[in-house]
Amino acid sequence: MAQGTAVKHKKKSKSVLKNIRQTERRAAVNRMNRTRVRTAMRRMRAALAAGDVAGAEKLASPTFSELDRAIRRRTLTENTANRYKSRLTLALNALKAKK
């Protein structure tokens, strides 16, 4: 297209504008939920890396609850959340076995 020529756009209908608003709202909620899950997992992984068995055990339940909540809110799929829980549990059990 030549530079300076105006591109004509079709006016967006009310339903399209509403759909855009809904999508933005859902994306914000999903981003918030995903952030909560990632923060909880980051804290638990930090405790595991530091070798803090008591701290990791204390963080396990809230972390798993966040993952389950993400499943219910459809932010994460069930398989993904279960894989995360499994790997965190394996790491926790390995750390307990070392001590």
Image (tube, grey):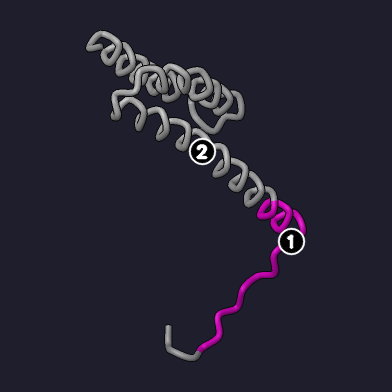
Give the side of residue 15 with respect to residue 63, left or right: right
Q: Nearer the viewer, residue 57 or 32?
A: 57
Residue at disc 2, secondary structure: helix
Give the side of residue 53 with respect to residue 8, left or right: left
Specify the quadrant of the image occupied by residue 32. Answer: top right
Is 7 magenta? The answer is: yes
Residue at left offset 33%, top offset 16%: 92
Where does residue 90 sit, x and y in percent of width and height? Answer: 31, 14
Where does residue 35 sit, x and y in percent of width and height? Answer: 51, 41
Bounds of the magenta segment: 5-21
Three-letter amino acid code at the position of disc 2: Arg
Residue under pointer 2? 34
Three-letter amino acid code at the position of disc 1: Ser
Q: Quadrant of the C terminus?
A: top left
Residue at disc 1, secondary structure: loop
Specify the quadrant of the image occupied by residue 55. Answer: top left
Select label 1 or label 2 by which is in front: 2
Q: Quadrant of the N terminus?
A: bottom left
